[in-house]
Amino acid sequence: MTDRAEVMDAAEAADLAKALGRAVRGEVGFDAASRALVTMDASNYRRVPLGVVAPRDAEDVAAVLEVCRARGVPVVARGGGTSIAGQATGTGVVLDFTRHMTGLLELDPGSRTAVVQPGLVLDRLQEAAAPHGLRFGPDPSTHSRCTLGGMIGNNSCGSHSVAWGTTADSVRELSVVTARGQRLRLGPGWAGAPDGLRELAEGELARLRTGFPDLPRRISGYALDALLPEKGADVARSFCGSEGTLGILTEAVVRLVEAPPARALAVLAYPDESAAAEAAAGLLPLRPLTVEGMAADLVPAGAGLPAGGAWLFVETGGETAAQARARARDVVRAADVVDALVVTDAAAQRALWRIREDASGRATRMPDGTEAWPGWEDCAVPPARLGAYLRDFRALLASHGLRGTPYGHFGDGCIHVRIDFDLLTEAGVGRFRRFSEELADLVVAHGGSLSGEHGDGQARAELLPRMYGARTVALFERAKAVWDPDDLLNPGMLVRPARLDENLRFAVLPRRPVDVAFGYPADGGDFAASVRRCVGVAKCRTTTAAGPAVMCPSFRATGEEEHSTRGRARLLHEMLAGELITDGWRSTEVRDALDLCLSCKGCRSDCPVGVDMATYKAEFLHHHYAGRRRPAAHRSMGRLPEWLRRAARTRTAPLLNALASVGPLARIGKRWAGITPERELPRLAARTFTAWWRGRKPARPTGDAPAARGGGDLVVLWPDTFTEHLSPSVGRAAVRVLEAAGLRVALPPTLLPGRGTLGDGRTRAATALLTARRARVCCGLTYVSTGQLDRARTVLRRTLDLMEPVLRAGLPVVVLEPSCAAALRTDLPELLSDDPRAARLASSVLTFAETLERHAPDWTPPVLGRPVAGQTHCHQHAVLGDTADRRLRAAAGLTGELSGGCCGLAGNFGFEKGHFDVSRACAEEQLLPSVRQASEDTVVLADGFSCRTQLEQLAGVRGRHLAEVLARALDAPEGDTA
């Protein structure tokens, strides 16, 4: 059957969309945004579909197949979209199972089985099975977002396959719909076999017995050998790994395994990866749960691993912690290691496993920042040959002038690697092809499989004849014809494949640099390279924030792909490509997707490849509204520092507060400012922080503090907009604590030279002072978050002019508001990359806790001895880090952990019209529950003004900055820290 998707005109596509809309109950999306979101998976490939359907049930799936078969339109099944070989992309209609068919229909602890729908995320199954002491065996590193349907389609494995095998080993029965509408229930004993499959297999028994390599991670091709009588003629098992080319899965009965009650982790250090690889097979007789390997170039600094150049992570289980620990120590004794570490603490084990799980993202950037790509992500060889294979693999890389960092499932002989292919030029793509062909031959020479976990897709299917030979590949084609005679399902995958160097997703991007405002220093100033950072591993699609993680709060609130970091990156990619999204920076599709981005910066730290959607959003808004009327919220909250300074100068804060308390006037004001009606307007301080500073009496040093001896360090306290006009109590408290710690506190200069800059070598001081004017420093945050980047640059250059004396003196700058500190640390140098003062100021910025730790290391805070609740500010988590804060809290006797996630207010976001529901949903995820569950004596910490406002407006709780808590303890009567 001819694939008409690529030649279908607009009228025919519209007719198809209408027909599908009439036939199914689920959503049908043929608009540019819906299509753009699924042009790619986590591979190097891109194919543009006609449309997307989110089926609600098996009847919808059958209806889609009927409509598409009548028109010759291909159908592609898609789960989490984390496939690395391109098999989750297609030119026809994409079935998105992640919206509706996500159910866990049944879990039977007695039979250790579960009935699942294809869109169920693996972690949801694991969470349901855990209370029964059970789990699903396979666990890919994408477990928090990959789906069971995708795992069955790819025959996924994961780190525990040495103990529990592949997905095929965990499947009992599968319900599928064939391209011609048959409903089949697949299982052993030829159950559910389509007509002709048994005859095909029984006519090729000799080939099925001899033509398939016997190794634990042989995923390539169709698993036709599962149809052998001695293997139970298991049709369900043979269907696993077919990548949606044989039928569409609608339900599965899967096996569960008993999870060991206790686990321990032995971390074994070796001089290099070859030594680790050669040692892995020797540990298998000890029956570990995992044997994972990775080298030093994928391990972040300070990871806490034993000294070495490569490591094996070997997990052991037991009925008790002592038994698991003893087995881990047996592993250490049996291993010839440079050094070793046995970890039994569950939190510490999770932290180490996160290093391994994030390797797929970190590997996309070489140590020098060069891009690296999948394509040869998961070859597998017999475990005993892994060391020799890795040496040959390294030699092949070197012969082509390529680099890559292998890691992965050493116990199964399966290696993951991202390679620095040049996929942007014709010469580079040619080298990619030549290397792929030679590597395929190398894998086969070592008795291996081209795919050991992720499937063949477009990346490797063309090379299957090198592994299986022409006759076995012809047998694959005959099997495909039995299941799908019309070649309707995912054509171009596995059989009659597209070339491995076609449909590369980079080919459509502009070759010339895009004119942008930010510097993008990590990507050589290339905005397209920044967008390319997203490789689709979809860590942003998790439905719960793990530990302190933040990314991606808007996706967790809506569950929509377009509100994930990956979805937004995909839309920006298509905007640059100009094929689907044709109006560039004026795109309404991109604007609407970015509208619910909170600019929390969580992706900057939590995304394994460092996608920075907050910056991309600011960049987009800058161009989108260039020369156009901006939304009211941009004019009001985007220019908030200006409005608040005017109120302070005119001393109208009490009047404005009074007017805001009058209901009708408040409603009019909020409508004019673009503020959602559900929000209360924050009250302005009657007296600003700097007004208090000017009127205060200098602190009288007492005791043995360094200031009393004249030796305290001088620090400059930044009067950010929120502290200055809305929460001056935070500033007053900070001054109290800093001075109590023996530090001398100053505020930034407010005299701006009228001609030139003092200290620039050209301006005469007297002339500059005579023409000087008063001004205030500002981090530019509100301008950046609303994309007013020209204005932000003007404000920041003025700030640098004001800060010249501070920079010359090399003084630390204390910033109390985390979002302002983050803006100065990151946005400032990236917006003004041409001004060396920007980097100097950025490096001078310290948080409140960092200041005390570095400049008053001998000071001991008052001990409160109370628990804490609240949330680490998202910008603090993403940009600043909270290590110093943790130590300061511990020293002050403040116990417990702050929650992760985002408060949901996020500066102007939660105040903007149309954002209230998402804002509240974000707060309800972690922040508000943590506060509601807190005891009466709990200290509610919230260093950010947004976080404090959200707590007050949604929970009626007053959160305090850490400086306020410590200042109150300093001033409390002895023994009273309540």
Image (spheres, helix red, strand yellow):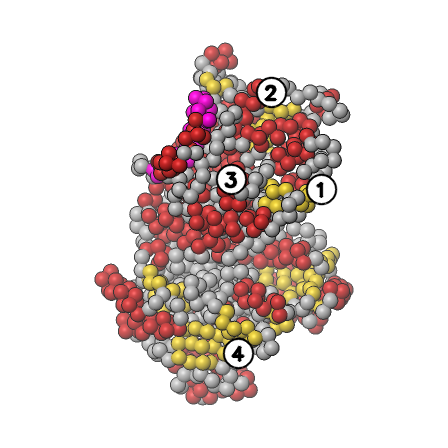
| C-alpha gap between disc 2 and disc 1 | 31 Å
Residue 569 visible from this viewpoint? no
| C-alpha gap between disc 1 and disc 4 | 55 Å
Q: Mark 1 against mark 4, which lies toward the viewer?
A: 1
**Range of magenta residues:** 630-654
Q: Are marks 3 and 2 in contact (CB under 8 Å)?
A: no
Q: Which residue is rendered at x = 47% and y = 70% of the image?
A: 117
Q: Is residue 526 left or right of residue 133?
A: left
| C-alpha gap between disc 3 and disc 4 | 52 Å
| C-alpha gap between disc 3 and disc 1 | 26 Å
Question: Residue 633, relative to residue 731: is it above or below?
Answer: below
Q: Are marks 1 and 4 in contact (CB under 8 Å)?
A: no
Q: Secondary structure at mark 4?
A: strand
Q: What residue does disc 1 label? A: 865
| C-alpha gap between disc 4 and disc 2 | 76 Å
Disc 3 residue type (three-letter):
Thr
Q: Which residue is rendered at x = 61% and y = 73% of the image?
A: 257
Q: Which mark is residue 172?
A: 4
Q: Are marks 3 and 1 in contact (CB under 8 Å)?
A: no
Q: Secondary structure at mark 3?
A: helix
Query: Is residue 881 within the magenta segment?
Result: no
| C-alpha gap between disc 3 and disc 2 | 27 Å
Disc 2 residue type (three-letter):
Arg
Q: What residue does disc 3 label? A: 949
